[in-house]
Amino acid sequence: MTDGGIHIRPLPSPAEVRLGTDIASLAISAVGPDGFSNEDVVVISHKVVSKSEGSTRLLGEVTPTVEAERIAKEQARDPRHVQVILDQSQRLIRAEQGVLISLTHHGFVCANAGVDESNSPDEETVILLPVDPDASARQIRADIVDQTGLPAPAVVITDSFGRAWRIGQVDVAIGCAGLAPLDDWRGRNDRDGRTLAATEIGIADAVAAAADLARSKDSGQPFVLVSGLARFITAEDGPGAAALRRPADQDMFLR
Amino acid sequence: MTDGGIHIRPLPSPAEVRLGTDIASLAISAVGPDGFSNEDVVVISHKVVSKSEGSTRLLGEVTPTVEAERIAKEQARDPRHVQVILDQSQRLIRAEQGVLISLTHHGFVCANAGVDESNSPDEETVILLPVDPDASARQIRADIVDQTGLPAPAVVITDSFGRAWRIGQVDVAIGCAGLAPLDDWRGRNDRDGRTLAATEIGIADAVAAAADLARSKDSGQPFVLVSGLARFITAEDGPGAAALRRPADQDMFLR
């Protein structure tokens, strides 16, 4: 951007995504003839990634355990849905007023272990988080390069997470490739020459939140293009959104 | 924006802000001759607001209590700084490894009760959060209208907060006026006609996070202009960022 600014635009909706759908190809079609540049970030709602990878469950094939039945009864939830959430979780952190907060196998803390019933192909299918969202982001990035022959944009895969202490969900990065997930200002100086207080900026999460502003929840627009962040885009895929997950044993609010 | 997108640009740095500095006037100068429109959001880093309102403390005038001395010793912190944090807090939530997380009098949960030493005018001054950031946002918005005679942009006042479970700070809205803080999708349907799972989107927080991407931490750019969010901008000032604070007695992670 000539003014040092950032531009965010939702890309047109793709066709329905199914198991095996090529997400890179859909993204390339959505961005149109101008294509991606290596100064762009392609932000992708995780649901299309999960569907394409088969990270879904048919509730009819789920047999709840006694534990799932007990939690479902206490929380007025579908026991099959609770079972899927338990299957996706290292452990349940809270179960209150129908809300289940869990630590997922990836290490995310979120409601329902990220298992989502909305926008699923039918009432009986629930959509899970991708098994390894950073690997998914790297694969999509590589596929875009393979199919276009052009330098790679960064790729961020998002989900909407609730927050402790604040009302409202905000999108966060659950996977990324080619974007510095954190901007580390620790030990650097402010404009008066004073050392800045511990300041690592969650760049990939801010990009996810920003991208979500550009689409409407019922728009079916999984792809958003963010331009103007060249300073955070890297040729290497980098550490991914894993760098944003605070290890459970270092977290003051996981005990 | 003609493409339905969002544009974010940092505005030029103003002169140093002191007690009594007119923030609206600085913002108007920074945006330049095009001025604001009533489809713009002016995002303002809270430090300039705090300085202009006198929400600062001279450490030399602080006498630590026995409690502050004890905490300071345990956490290897300056007892005067700890005292200022306690003065800004309803209660301390965590004190570990030098990190103090508190519930502020406003109801925010954040490190150091939002008390910040970086970018302060001198080593001996710490900057507090504004006393009532929503009131500050409403005042700045009204002042912009008074001084320009044009319809009001929305105003968002931000701070960088750490998050539970995730590494890295992200800017959030601590005050706002003229922006819907939440987009409430509860009870509305997704594109397949299914009722969406509880989904309130933290719009004002996403705007704060997005705006911070456009500036560098050492840039001294307190003002960022966000365009393209007309659908969330309201003529009325609205409920402010208070709507984003989860009441302590309803929070699963404040017990």
Image: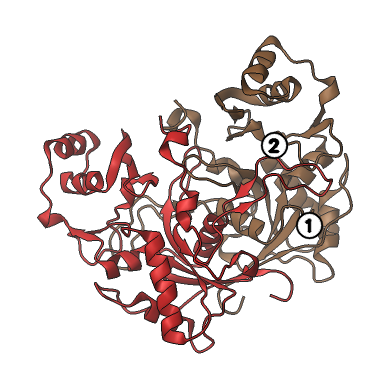
Chain colours: A red, B brown
| Residue type, label 2 | Asp
Chain bearing mark 1? B
The quarter of the rendered structure image containing the C terminus of chain A is top left
Task: Please state the horizontal and vertical placement of residue B98, each as a whole percent of the image.
Answer: 61, 28
Q: Earlier in the sequence, mark 2 or mark 1?
A: 2
Within-10-Å neighbours for mark 2: few <14, some 14–19, many 20+: few
Q: Residue at x 64, y 54 (%)?
A: B178
* Real-space Cα separation, disc 2 to disc 1, in angstroms: 20 Å
Most distant residue in the front direction: A236
Question: Can the viewer see residue A195?
Answer: yes
Q: Is residue A85 left or right of residue A158?
A: left
| Residue type, label 1 | Val
Task: Please state the horizontal and vertical placement of residue B144, each as a whole percent of the image.
Answer: 79, 56
Residue A140 location, quadrant: bottom left
Q: Residue at x 59, y 46 (%)?
A: B169
**Location of residue A254 with respect to A224 vertically, above or below:** above
Task: Please state the horizontal and vertical placement of residue B100, each as a whole percent of the image.
Answer: 60, 28
Which tag is nearer the camera, tag 2 or tag 1?
2
Q: Which residue is mark 2?
A: B132
